[in-house]
Amino acid sequence: MAQNPAESFFGGLLIEVFIACILYGITTLQTFIYFQKYQGDTRFLKLFVGGVWILETAHTAFCIQFVYAYLVSSFGDFEYFGHINWGIGITVFTEVILSTLVQLFYVRRVWIMSNKSKILTAALTIFTLARVAFGIGSMVLSYTYTAWVPFRAQTSATVTVSGGLGAAALVDVLVALTLSFYLTRGRSSQHKQSNSRVNLIMLYAVNSGAITATASILSVILYATQKQSLVFLGLVEIQGKLYANSFLGSLNARSHIRNKANPAAQQYPSFESYSHNGFRPVAPPVPKVEVYRQTVVTNDMGMRVQPDVDNVSIPSASSSNYDMKTLKGGELV
């Protein structure tokens, strides 16, 4: 019995699209949590988060569209597997825009942490924009060469795919290393709680950059080695979800990081609260506690008598309907 060509050509991509849909669900949950917990953030940041979620929704919809086209609309038409569906170009474009927005957000953090270093920020921005150019080039080529064989045979396609993914990986690594460097330099031996926060932020930055960079490198390797499979494309689709979850995770982790470093803290500043030289420690507010005391004295007959306490007023014994809830400080129930 002949092997089903759909299994080798499309099986890996189908599983990866399933994983991407799961990650989209996590993105939606993180977006909901963000708008619930951080209502005091700036309008720009809220719009940024909303834009990321909209791009993720569109990206997921077109992923489902091209899977449906290959496996349902063209069911049994194995020759169609060699055709590049029009929805794939749109998923590449939305993934490029999404990853670029997230990377520019991290570049802005580098700009803040590096005391507005123009050279460093400009270098990261150039690599980020190069990622956009390569990504758009790949999208255009997918509509120029509408079949996979001629597309992957083109040197220009190899350059745009590998160049775009390589630039994305380079930016991720550089951002993680730069943030770690400036956070380390901003440590203070006199603020242990701040140092604990710095360690957590560094760990998160390095892990996020490592995951997205690894996805980019694996996509390039699979594109070059797996010529008879679209498994590389599935990793590209997953990569966009990783960027979105990395971005939203960094926002939602703010309260967790500060709680971890100082459980007594109840109010937190923005995640980007950095001083001129680095991380700025913020002292938590001191809670206020008020204590009220009410003294009631009764005799052996159950009658209430006036206690010998200054500035205490108690109704007379003739008041049979004394309301025990009328105490200074509020109701008992």
Image (cartoon, rainbow, N blue to C red):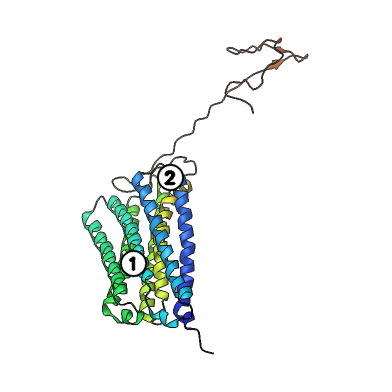
Q: Position of residue 31 (x, y in %)?
A: 44, 52
Q: Position of residue 71 (x, y in %)?
A: 47, 75
Q: Given the current orientation, which residue lies at the most extreme right position?
A: 301
Count residues near mark 1 (Cα–Cα under 10 Å), then give few for <14, some for 14-19, many for 20+: many
Residue at the image point whose x is 42% and y is 50% from the top: 197
Up the image or down, 42 lies above or below 123; here it is above
Q: Which mark is residue 65?
A: none
- 250 or 40: nearer the eye? 40
- 275 or 136: nearer the eye? 136
Which comes sooner in the sequence, label 1 or label 2?
2
Up the image or down, 87 lies above or below 229; here it is above
Q: CA distance from mark 1 to mark 2?
A: 30 Å
Could you tell me the amino acid type at mark 2? Tyr
Q: Position of residue 48 (x, y in %)?
A: 36, 51
Q: Is residue 333 left or right of residue 11?
A: right
Residue at the image point whose x is 39% and y is 63% from the top: 240
Q: Which quadrant holds residue 305?
A: top right
Secondary structure at numbered mark 1: helix
Which quadrant, please, contains the N terminus?
bottom right
Residue at the image point whose x is 42% and y is 75% from the top: 231
Q: Is residue 261 left or right of residue 333?
A: left
Which quadrant, please, contains the C terminus?
top right
Q: Is residue 10 visible?
A: yes
Residue highlighted by disc 2? 38
Residue highlighted by disc 1? 169
Q: Is residue 301 left or right of residue 222?
A: right
Q: Given the current orientation, which residue lies at the most extreme left position?
A: 119
Q: Is residue 188 visible?
A: no
Dot in front, 1 or 2: 2
Count residues near mark 2 (Cα–Cα under 10 Å), then give few for <14, some for 14-19, many for 20+: some
Q: Position of residue 84 (x, y in %)?
A: 37, 75
Could you tell me the amino acid type at mark 1? Ala
